[in-house]
Image (tube, grey):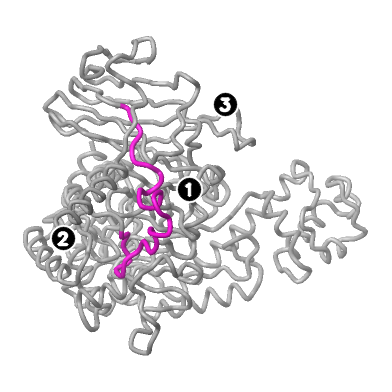
Amino acid sequence: MKKLFLLIVLTLANTCVAQEELTSTIVNLNSIPKTSYQTDNLDSKQSAQGIEINIQSGKKGSIVFTANDGYWDLTKWVFLSVELENKTQEEVRFDPIIMYDSPKRQTKSKNESNTLAHIGYLKPLESLIYNNVLIRDQITAADYPHKKDFPGMKGIPNGVIMIWKGVDAKHIKGLTIVFPAQNFERKVLLKRIFKKRSALPAKYAKDKKDFFPFINKYGQYKHDTWPGKITNDSQFVEAIKKEQIDLAKHTGSLEWDRFGGLANGPKLDATGHFRTQKLNGKWWIINPDGHLFWSSGVNGAGKLTVGTPTKGREHFFEGIPNKTYSNNKYFKGSSYFHGLKNLHRKYGDNSEQKYLDITLDRMKSWGLNTLGGWSSEDVGSASEQKKLPYTVYINATLPEINSKFPDVFDPKWKNDIEEKIKQKAKLVKNDPYFFGFFINNEIHWGTPQTLATNTLAKGKNSAGKKVYIALLKEQLKTIANFNDKTGSQFKSWQALLNGKIKKPDIKHRLLKEINEDHYRNMAEVYFKTTRELINKHAPGKLYLGCRWHGNHKNDINVSVGAKYLDILSFNAYENEVEHYPYPAAEIDKPFIISEFNFGSLDAGKFFTGLGYASSQRNRGEKYKNFIEGALRNPRIVGAHWFMWANSTTAGRGNGENASCGLVSMTDQIYYPLISYMREVNYNLYAYRLDKIDK
């Protein structure tokens, strides 16, 4: 009877695995007519195994498959996957590009290209399945009715990801595979194009009630297995032993001086602070000892908090204890912090204090020389032997004029930002390891027109509104002129000030120059004020900027910021940045990529993050490619990965539950990613000097 029961359990388990990895062919490559696909700059031949592709040395080629019936419907699938085989002795790069339409986004231009681009690599003679993640548009949420059962999560089990910009999986037009130019002839066999992994977890589809709870006491997904998953506390001990062997084997880059700069390179003026200098037409950071420095960093270093809201979602979790005095530190409001609890399980008492030293040892072994935004700021008190360059982050946006953009004319904001800079400066101004200040993050600058609209919606006591109306009065003279230009009917400038105009009928085209002047003035006051306060309280220290992102950076705010910042910072969730378009070519200023990452769905997570990859290995491949491209850009002086640890499985307050960490929420190291980090970071200076000084 026991044997029969065991057989039934194993059969059900195997059925679940089979359902998780269901596949469905999209294009039968064994019988597809050559007229059903297009090629450019490559030769193709059909065989019993698939399509044989040949690309000449130094050439870029592509092959395009389009849906016969207009679209492929992938709403029930997680991946659009391809299987390829490399027939050469060299590593081959291929770039799958998913093409789609977005009929629900009516405002899009008909000529706008909707694509989702990936980057993959085939090792010599390797056969590989590459899973193209479908980052989906949140406007298509109605296509996934089960999403309602997983509130507060951008990615839901099994990996259906919905954010503000992505594909409409019901309207996939086709797939292009590009082979970028490489200096050898490439022979590749394209074996399959297929749908992979059901969008619904097998257990959920079978019995929704039985699916919950789906998160175990360590904060991990219950209904899957993967390398590094923790199922009992003894595995933490095993992980520590494995890491000790790894750290002893990889002791760090031989290029480094004490700051992580180039020890045996040019010796320039040593000021005791980090600074920037242009050498032979290329920008560099110069470290306090006068050596070349390129900032290879990570956000959130030295921390493993990983909190998740539980209120209204209690049925998600198992093993969350009742809040008591002894475990109070693992709770904050309605959130429980699996990461903090896992640290204690792994390292015992004072685990948070121990973790900073552990982090610094890891960073040196992994070739990372900078603690980026939101990292531990206790580095200043660490021993000289352990220390690495670090940053501090200051948030001061109140009162706001736009989301995360302060009303810079309000003295409350200036008082707030000065006090915060002053307090941080006390700790860092005399520390040579202090790299620089980030002030605010991803400000919603908007446009001159949206800023004007938001400003007029404020109350009569808004300092920014008073300044804007004063400019209107100066330029237009009378309220009648304002009314004529905007189609308004205000009786006086005071009436305009008194009114909270939610949706003013402003003809922005006619106020364009005035709005741009006001916008530029606000940017000028913002950067000038913060620059002067840093100079006052921490002279000689770098101002690293506001971490621009997305469409919120533009020619006005970036060009104004460049006047005051030592180094500009951009959060860039791109595949590559060698030819990054900001700042404008005429702005001769260095910048860092203050956030980037690549996540995958092969280790119990449901959201890749804004950067995406097929696997843990592919995360490393894309990291190496990203950093090498950044090193080739003569204005990029650093790149910081976001972030140290994964987001929580069930999502933090904003729903983010990304697999973007160097470590998991149980502090398990993603060794395939780390191996690629070492590969590029250990030879960072040799590569940059070779590539940009030729």
- Residue that protrudes farthest toward the bottom in the picture: 325
Where, quadrant-wise, is the N terminus in this rendering?
bottom left
Vertical order, 351 against 295 (above or below): below
| Circle 1 residues within 10 Å: few <14, some 14–19, many ≥20 | many
Is residue 421 visible in the rendered structure shown here? yes
Q: Which SS class for mark 1? A: strand
Pointers 2 and 3 in contact (CB under 8 A)? no
Position of residue 566 measured from the top left corner of the image (x, y, whole percent) = 42, 58
* Kind of residue sitting beneath label 3: Asn
Q: Which residues are magenta?
A: 193-222
Q: Say which amino acid is labelled 1.
A: Met
Q: Residue at x 64, y 57 (%)?
A: 521
Classify mark 2: helix, strand or loop.
Answer: helix
Question: Residue at horizontal 83%, vertical 51%?
Answer: 476
> Where is residue 644, by image quadrant?
bottom left
Q: Nearer the viewer, residue 236 or 459?
A: 236
Residue 547, image x, y percentages: 46, 57
Mark 2 vs mark 3, CA separation in Å: 48 Å
Task: Decide which of tag 3 and tag 1 comes sooner along the chain.
Answer: 3
Which residue lies under the disc numbered 3? 111
* SS at badge 3: loop
Residue topped by disc 2: 365
Q: Earlier in the sequence, mark 2 or mark 1?
A: 1
Residue underneath mark 1: 162
Determine the image quadrant of residue 51. Answer: top left
- Which residue shows up at 38% across the image and 38% down it? 579
Compute the Cα span from label 3 to label 1: 24 Å
Magenta span has 224?
no
Question: In the image, what residue occupies the spot 23% across and 26% down?
Answer: 182
